[in-house]
Amino acid sequence: MEVKLFSGSESRYLASEIIKNYGAEEGKLKFQRFSDGEIQTEICESVRGAYTFLIQSTFAPSDNLLELLLMIDTAKRASAGYIIAVIPYFGYARQDRKDKPRVPISAKLIANLLEAAGANRVMTLDFHADQIQGFFDIPVDHLKGNAIFIPFLKEKDLSKVKFASPDVGGVKRARMYAKYFGRDLVICDKRRETANEVAEIIVIGDVKGAEIIMVDDIVDTAGTLCKAADALMEKGAASVKAICTHPVLSGNAYENIANSRIDELIVTDTIPLKQQSDKISVLTVAPLFAKAIRNTHEHRSISALYIE
């Protein structure tokens, strides 16, 4: 079955690199906006019977999600053989449960929308919570950010490193790195007063003289990371770095990081940076997604791309 790869308008910076690593040419897709802001998508070549990969992260604004849904519907109505939504950053993943009355489970709604639009499969990287895979009734290829970060860290001297989770919810993620490299695990227990505002952080574990690497999946306002870095340094850590898959970086995030005690924040390019920062380094996910796309098309295992 022929392979066709298309990019959404806001993810072309990454999609073009994925397609280049795959060794193909980007499919011709045209976007048009009506004067009232409505989006129209048009596939400008035949996809009849083809494996059709549609690459689009669903970061803000919500037009990126709507654009992806329209791309899927366009491919379905053009008789694509098999439609795969490649979503490096899956937006709304943090709303994966009802944590208080009268709120939506938005991640489940997004899963329903993707299926209703006509997606046959979803490929993504580092869901905020693994159970989101269960929101789908179609196959989900859930790639892991450790396939990007572990090769990067292997080139570093980790003899004095301890891995830390900036909150209790991320302990499993940080523990995987600590176990893989044979290093100790530190936990930062945070208490929030309101959303995006951390009131207090308690450090669990000995960090004196250690070079700390915090591990997280999403960095938004960076409030948690920066306060965790302060708490770790006050407990005697020699230095603090952080690795986070998705650089949402909203609000005062860039200013918070610049003024923080974090030496370096290492992220991937699932979301484009809004501005450059001397403290932020970016690793590309393009080769990982290119391999996953190839394995999917050739009916080979995706688990071969995982690092356990």
Image (spheres, rainbow, N blue to C red):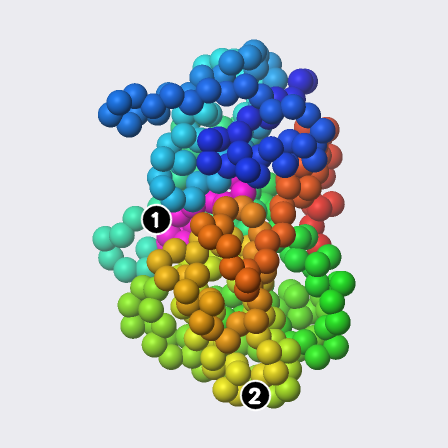
Where disc 1 sits, the SS reads: loop
Q: CA distance from mark 1 to mark 2?
A: 40 Å
Q: Is residue 92 magenta?
A: yes
Q: Is residue 179 left or right of residue 213?
A: right
Task: Indicate the position of residue 242 as horizontal and vertical percent values.
Answer: 56, 67
The front one of 147 and 264 is 264
Task: Indicate the position of residue 228 as horizontal and vertical percent values.
Answer: 47, 75
Q: Is residue 98 left or right of residue 280?
A: left
The front one of 290 and 255 is 255
Residue at which label 2 appears: 236
Q: Is residue 101 magenta?
A: no
The residue that appears at 39% across and 47% down in the rendered structure is: 92
Residue 206 in view here: no
Task: Indicate the position of residue 171 as horizontal and vertical percent values.
Answer: 54, 69
Q: From the viewer's perspective, is the residue at label 1 or at label 2 nearer? A: 2
Q: Is residue 126 left or right of residue 9?
A: right
Q: Quadrant of the N terminus?
A: top right
Instruction: Give the residues in magenta.
Output: 85-97
Residue 241 in view here: yes
Q: Quadrant of residue 68?
A: top left
Q: What amino acid does circle 1 point to? A: Ile
Q: Is disc 1 in contact with disc 2, using a CB cutoff of under 8 Å?
A: no
Asked if residue 241 is positioned above or below residue 201 in the image, the reply reads: above
Q: Is residue 121 left or right of residue 151?
A: left
Asked if residue 275 is positioned above or below residue 182 in the image, the reply reads: above
Residue at which label 1 appears: 105
The front one of 77 and 8 is 8
Q: What amino acid does circle 2 point to? A: Gly
Where disc 2 sits, the SS reads: loop
The residue that appears at 51% across and 59% down in the rendered structure is: 277
